[in-house]
Image (cartoon, coloured by chain):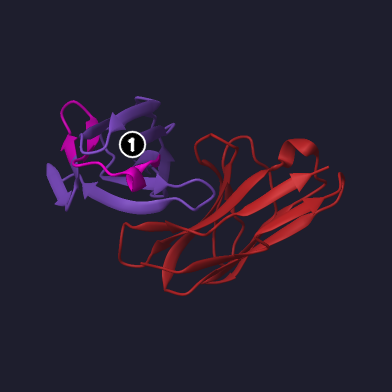
Amino acid sequence: GENVEQHPSTLSVQEGDSAVIKCTYSDSASNYFPWYKQELGKRPQLIIDIRSNVGEKKDQRIAVTLNKTAKHFSLHITETQPEDSAVYFCAARDQMNTGFQKLVFGTGTRLLVSP
Amino acid sequence: SAVISQKPSRDICQRGTSLTIQCQVDSQVTMMFWYRQQPGQSLTLIATANQGSEATYESGFVIDKFPISRPNLTFSTLTVSNMSPEDSSIYLCSAKLAGSYEQYFGPGTRLTVT
């Protein structure tokens, strides 16, 4: 089955800097890669996603890139703000032989943006 | 997107008792899932709730401990049975929208077992 690794586990940046979180996956058949933001005590919130037929996707200050050959994808946040502080999870859709699909999550990155 | 609600939002339960968590989705969904999240940890899939049939459980989770129902497309329940303090965690319902890859989460149920 799919295995997702995420780095770094914690990331501290100054307000206005950029932040990059990286994930690698093991199953070359995986075709969908979402990113979730989870603030303290809140539910995981889908912030951006990318499918395997696309190399990059952007939404205002956040972007996701995908390298299928290397089997890794990254979240880029530009002009960080204190409200970006949260735990970010990457995930990959596990394409099992049975046709059953599920998301496999990374271990999370705690991002702290200091004013 | 989808609006997912869960009841209860939190509970404190005695060892040996059971708690049933309800999940309601406001949109057409194809798949519903139940996750567990320990403090400071990632999301662990317990099972996929299948409409009209038995849930599909992940390794380490069994039906006797976590019975799941899904009587219709937009509603599911998870029961945590014969609870022990090790079951203290946040339980999250999730749903995948019909015709989409997107998956959304409910607000979670914070369970404390004493």
Residue under the point 78% across and 38% down: B85
Highlighted range, magenta = A65-86
Is A3 inside the magenta-drawn segment?
Answer: no
Secondary structure at numbered mark 1 = strand
Callout 1, which amino acid? Answer: Val
Chain colored purple: A
Q: Quadrant of residue B102?
A: bottom left
Question: Going 86% across and 44% down the picture, which residue do you hit?
Answer: B15
Q: Position of residue B75 (x, y in %)?
A: 57, 70
Q: Position of residue A28 (x, y in %)?
A: 25, 33
Horizontal side of B49 relative to A57 (left or right) equals right
Determine the chain carrying the residue at label 1.
A
Residue B60, above or below B27: above
Q: Is A85 contained in the magenta span?
A: yes
Closer to us: A79 or A102: A79
**Quarter of the image that includes the C terminus of chain A:** top left
Q: Which residue is mark 1?
A: A113
Placement of B38 over or under B20, stated as above or below = above
How many residues crowd mark 1 within 10 Å: few (<14), some (14–19), many (20+)?
many
Which chain identifier belongs to the red chain? B
The picture places residue B32, in percent across and down from the top left corner, at: 50, 59
Q: Which residue appears farthest toward the front when viewing the image? A: A115
Residue B25 image offset from top left, x and y in percent: 50, 70
Q: Which image quadrant is residue A109 in?
A: top left
**In the figure, is residue B41 to the left or right of B2?**
right
Image quarter where the N terminus of chain A lies is top left
Q: Residue at x 42, y 49 (%)?
A: A100
Residue B44 visible to an observer of this rendering: yes
